[in-house]
């Protein structure tokens, strides 16, 4: 009898192991990750060509790869087997060569927004709609899934709801199940997510003044906050967009310009709802569904229910001055 129980327990254990292995996500191994700036040109049989800006090089498992942005559409992706021409150059020269593109225009606009300590960066777009951003700062609480489900249910059409998810590495590492659930919403076309770098550690202390807090904490490695977070995102099969959100929306000119030196565009917000800011057409709305800010998420649902919230627009579709409808076909992040 004991032998039968042991044998069946063994079978159950093995079956459990097999199931876990089967459903566990396959994460990439990212190594030798570093900034690398180049123009990649890919030609088509009809004689036309497409330009991409390469921002990083790394090993994706054992394969040499690049992280790129299409400067016209703003979508990012991984290039593993280049079929075109790669010309290495300085980031400044590359942006100059692509001056007529959306990426270069947004980059130059962001350069003019560097001096403020609070909320530096792009905070508003000339669009017929709003940008809705979720900040996932490190938190001991689970993701506010009830809010997100209500947020999706209140959408007026059956299209995926465009949202910007500003995600920190420490949140990713401590909330693997929440991350998988969030990614499943994108996979099942409930959300159209633009993934934005929100720093790796996202340090914060209630005891420190703002000038010594967040990314301004003494001894903070800006390169680690930026690049290590990109590594964590890529290892979890998330392709970072070309935007960066400072923790707490706090920065200084030196750090701001250093972040831009990595080819990233700082993203602020003119409607942090929990701070009492009200959204208008073109606003970048900020709430925290990481369990730490119920006031903001409640206010966002209230705006949806009252019909006072303009149609959400995908950040991946934003140009410097162009307007886009929420019904426009969405450009997805992908790999070449």
Image: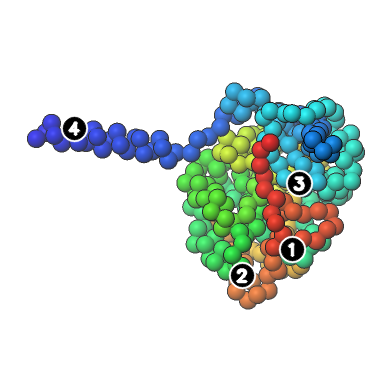
Between 5 and 174, the one lying in front of the other is 5
Q: Which residue is mark 3?
A: 74
Circle 4 — which element? helix
Q: Residues within 10 Å of mark 2 (few under 14, many from 20)?
A: few
Q: Residue at x 61, y 70 (%)?
A: 156
Choose the circle earlier in sequence order: 3 or 4: 4
Residue count near mark 1 (Cα–Cα under 10 Å), binned few <14, some 14–19, many ≥20: some
Q: Are marks 2 and 3 in contact (CB under 8 Å)?
A: no
Q: Which residue position is annotated with label 1?
A: 325
Residue beneath disc 2: 156
Q: x, y percentage for residue 260?
A: 79, 40
Q: 4 or 221: nearer the eye?
A: 4
Q: Secondary structure at mark 2?
A: loop
| Residue at point 65%, 75% (across, down) | 307
Q: Residue drawn at (69%, 63%), measured in percent from left and top?
A: 327
CA distance for labels 1 and 2: 14 Å
Tell me which label, 4 or 1, sits earlier in the chain.
4
Q: Are marks 3 and 4 in contact (CB under 8 Å)?
A: no
Instruction: Locate residue 101, reporting x and y percent.
Output: 85, 46
The image's mark for residue 40 is none
User: Residue 108: x and y, percent?
Assistant: 87, 46
């Amino acid at each position: 009898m004991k032998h039968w129980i042991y044998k069946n327990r063994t079978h159950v254990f093995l079956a459990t192991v097999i199931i876990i292995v089967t459903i566990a996500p396959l994460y990439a191994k990212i190594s030798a990750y570093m900034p690398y700036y180049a123009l990649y040109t890919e030609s088509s049989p009809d004689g036309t060509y497409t330009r991409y800006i390469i921002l990083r090089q790394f090993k994706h498992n054992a394969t040499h790869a690049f992280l790129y942005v299409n400067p016209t559409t703003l979508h990012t992706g991984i290039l593993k087997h280049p079929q075109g021409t790669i010309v290495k150059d300085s980031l400044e020269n590359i942006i100059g060569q692509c001056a007529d593109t959306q990426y270069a225009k947004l980059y130059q606009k962001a350069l003019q927004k560097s001096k403020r300590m609070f909320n530096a960066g792009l905070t508003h777009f000339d669009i017929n709609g709003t940008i809705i951003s979720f900040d996932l700062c490190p938190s001991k609480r689970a993701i506010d899934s009830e809010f997100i489900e209500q947020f999706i249910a209140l959408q007026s059409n059956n299209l995926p709801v465009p949202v910007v998810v500003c995600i920190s590495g420490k949140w990713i590492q401590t909330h693997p199940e929440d991350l998988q659930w969030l990614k499943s919403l994108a996979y099942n076309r409930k959300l159209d997510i633009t993934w934005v770098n929100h720093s790796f550690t996202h340090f914060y202390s209630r005891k420190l003044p703002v000038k010594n807090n967040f990314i301004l904490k003494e001894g903070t490695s800006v390169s680690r906050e930026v690049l290590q977070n990109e590594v964590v995102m890529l290892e979890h099969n998330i392709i970072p967009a070309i935007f960066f959100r400072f923790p707490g929306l706090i920065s200084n000119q030196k750090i701001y310009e250093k972040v831009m030196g990595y080819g990233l565009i700082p993203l602020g917000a003119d409607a942090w709802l929990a701070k009492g800011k009200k959204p208008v057409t073109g606003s970048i709305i900020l709430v925290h569904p990481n369990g730490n800010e119920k006031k903001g998420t409640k206010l966002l649902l209230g705006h949806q229910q009252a019909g006072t919230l303009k149609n959400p627009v995908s950040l991946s579709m934003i140009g410097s001055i162009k307007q886009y409808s929420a019904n426009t076909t969405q450009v997805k992040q992908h790999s070449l």
